[in-house]
Amino acid sequence: MRLGIISDTHGSLEAWNRCLQVLGDIDLLLHAGDVLYHGPRNPLPGGYGAKDLAEAINRYSGRLVIARGNCDADIDQLVIDVPIQAPYALVVVDGVSIMVTHGHMTSQDELAELMNRFKLDIIVTGHTHVPGIVKPFGDKGGVIVNPGSPSLPKAAEGRGTCALIEDRAIRIIYIDDGSDAMVSLW
């Protein structure tokens, strides 16, 4: 199982393409929202082209699940063929249960509660533009992963990121060179 994770592309075709390049051959791509619009608080990201990104998403031949972010609007669904699900998208891949949500309305404690309540293995979030991997229950299982943003990163390094889940490892990957920002087993 190879799952790609992205979030907060904010209309950057360049960021989308870099993510696909560094992720390589994946079984499923999960997008945690803020797909096309950059939002009123953000600058235009490099490679901004919401229409071009929508067309690229529609041409994407792999399996794709998208959760709705706070910058995603009803109109976006008119130009993107894949359903933009809100507030959660649930998938099960090879027996691994995954919830995708943007995370703008849910605290870490609430995410942990959802994980426990619905017996989830992984929760994917976005919104903060800061990558992270959290194990709310320690070694007892369950991981919350935020891939950061490939287009408008807000981590100290200022480098765009996405994430890859392969086997029992989660890697946060810098999109500029494909190197690991962080790795965790789950």
Image (tube, rainbow, N blue to C red):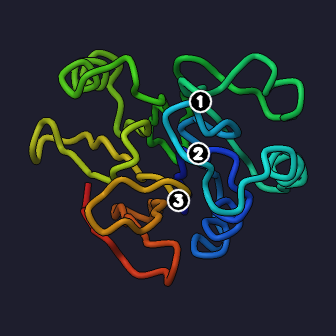
Where is residue 26 shown, x and y percent of the image? 64, 64
| Residue visible at 65% across and 22% down in the picture | 85
Q: What is the spatial separation of the Cα atoms under label 2 and label 1, in whole angstroms?
A: 8 Å
| Residue visible at 44% across and 42% down in the picture | 96
Q: Nearer the viewer, residue 119 or 49?
A: 49
Q: Quadrant of residue 141?
A: top left
Q: Amino acid at mark 3?
A: Pro
Is 131 positioned to the left or the right of 141 in the image?
Answer: right
Where is residue 21 shown, x and y percent of the image? 66, 75
Q: Nearer the viewer, residue 94 or 43?
A: 43
Where is residue 151 shown, x and y percent of the image? 55, 57
Quick one: label 2 or label 3, which is nearer the N terminus?
Answer: 2
Q: Quadrant of residue 51?
A: top right
- 155 to 35, vertically: above or below: below
Asked if the residue at tag 1 contacts the one at tag 3, i.e. Cβ–Cβ closer than 8 Å, the answer is no
Q: Which image quadrant: the N terminus?
A: bottom right
Q: What is the spatial separation of the Cα atoms under label 3 and label 1, in whole angstroms?
A: 17 Å
Q: Amino acid at mark 2?
A: Leu
Badge 1 crowding class, 10 Å Cα cut-off, few under 14, some 14 to 19, many 20 or more, is many
Q: What is the spatial separation of the Cα atoms under label 2 and label 3, in whole angstroms?
A: 14 Å
| Residue underneath mark 3 | 150
| Residue underneath mark 2 | 30
| Residue underneath mark 1 | 67
Q: Secondary structure at mark 2?
A: strand
| Residue visible at 40% across and 47% down in the picture | 129
